[in-house]
Structure formats: C-alpha cells, structure tokens
Image: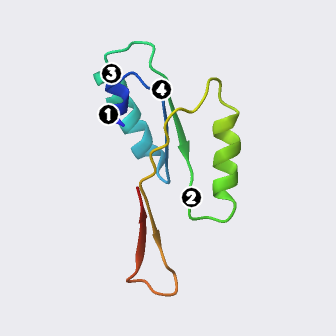
C-alpha cells in the first residue's frame, strides 16, 4: 500500500479488521507525497460466501477506474487446517 501511494495511486484497502485498516490508511496518508490521495477502506472477510461479489460491487461503484489490483490474501482450508492458499 505504501509503495503504491508513493507512486500516486489512490487505494482501496480490504481486510477483515477495520481498526488495522484505519491505522494503515492513516500511515499511508501521512507518508504520501500527494495531498489529494484517496484511500478507501472496506472491512470484510473475503473468505465469506458472496464477499467477492460484494467487493466487486463496492469497488466498481467508486468514482474513477481501477488501474491495478494487488491481491495478497490467505484462505485456510477448513477441512485441512494445515493447508493455506496464498494469492498475490
């Protein structure tokens, strides 16, 4: 997030914990060289059923256009707790 903000990109940050997102947003805005940088936070669990569709609807409703998607998520397999799927 910090690197993309440094390059002047507006951000949409998504994670389960709203408090952590707010902290990252605050830090990004403090360090950003562009005063008009927009940072939107969406607290949601992308592992939940329907979450991807909800995220799509929320992000496509935002003004502007999405130029870059960076996905770094970990999904735990509930049937096999020692197996994780990481998306980058």
* Residue at 43% in and 26% down: 9
Q: Position of residue 51 (x, y in %)?
A: 64, 57
Question: Which residue does the numbered mark 1 point to in the structure image?
Answer: 2
Give the number of the disc on residue 32: 3
* Residue at 61% in and 28% down: 65
Q: Quadrant of residue 22?
A: top left
Instruction: Tell which tag, 4 or 2, sits nearer the viewer.
Output: 4
Q: SS for tag 1? A: helix
Q: Quadrant of residue 46?
A: bottom right
- Disc 1 vs disc 2: Cβ atoms closer than 8 Å? no
Chain-order first, disc 4 or disc 3: 4
Chain-order first, disc 2 or disc 3: 3
Left or right of residue 56: residue 12 = left
Give the camera-side residue of 23 and 84.
Answer: 84
Q: Quadrant of residue 6?
A: top left
Give the number of the disc on residue 46: 2
Label 4 packing within 10 angstroms: few (<14), some (14-19), many (20+): some
């Amino acid at each position: 997030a910090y690197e993309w903000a440094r390059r002047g990109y507006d951000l949409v940050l998504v994670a389960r914990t709203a408090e952590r997102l707010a902290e990252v947003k605050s830090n990004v805005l403090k360090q950003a060289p562009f005063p008009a940088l927009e940072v939107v936070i969406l607290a949601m669990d992308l592992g939940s059923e329907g979450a991807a569709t909800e995220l799509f609807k929320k992000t496509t409703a935002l003004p502007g256009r999405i130029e870059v998607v960076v996905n770094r998520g970990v999904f735990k397999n509930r049937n096999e707790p020692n197996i994780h799927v990481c998306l980058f």
